[in-house]
Amino acid sequence: MAFGIVFGIGYGATFTQTSPFVAKYFGVNTLAVFVGMYYTVSGIGYLFGPPIAGVILERTRSWGTPYIALKLYAGLPMAVAAVAIVFIKLNLRTQRSP
């Protein structure tokens, strides 16, 4: 129940804040490119994610309470993406400073 509430509150921000985030951190000139890439990669994930999750669930037989394999499957790419965004931001900051 708690996951559903947190997911419901945070998921809407994913779509509504993508464009402002990209415009702020990468500039308005690259907005179309970055948002297009974001939605393309997201679409691939939405298409292949559930079948892959089903295979992981069946192979690991972790459909009990923990779902640890699926948590890792979903969480690790998000953590890697967050780290990549930080590195991109730091790289852009060092390029702009004199």
Image (cartoon, helix red, strand yellow):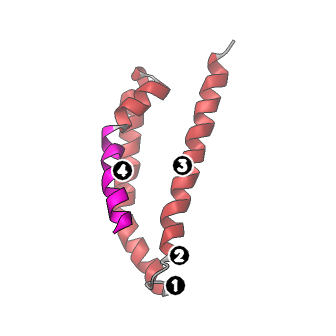
Q: Earlier in the sequence, mark 1 or mark 4?
A: 4
User: Marks 3 and 4: CB-CB under 8 Å?
Assistant: no
User: Per the image, is 96 magenta?
Assistant: no
Q: Nearer the viewer, residue 1 or 58?
A: 1
Report the residue marked by disc 3.
81
Which label lies toward us, 2 or 1?
Answer: 2
Q: CA distance from mark 3 to mark 4?
A: 17 Å
Q: Earlier in the sequence, mark 2 or mark 1?
A: 1
Q: Position of residue 26 (x, y in %)?
A: 48, 27
Q: Is residue 27 left or right of residue 4?
A: right
**Vertical order, 41 against 59 (above or below):** above
Q: Nearer the viewer, residue 62 or 58?
A: 62
**Vertical order, 5 against 42 (above or below):** below
- Extent of the magenta region: 1-16
Check residue 68 in the rendering and tell me which mark sits there, or answer none. Answer: 2
User: Marks 4 and 2: CB-CB under 8 Å?
Assistant: no
Q: Count the marks: how many?
A: 4
Residue at the (60%, 26%) spot, across then down? 92
Which label lies toward us, 4 or 2?
Answer: 4
Report the residue marked by disc 4.
10
Amino acid type, label 1: Thr
* Chief secondary structure of the magenta portion: helix
Q: CA distance from mark 3 to mark 1?
A: 25 Å
Amino acid type, label 3: Ala
Residue found at the very far top of the displayed protein: 98
Is label 1 in a helix, a strand or a loop?
helix
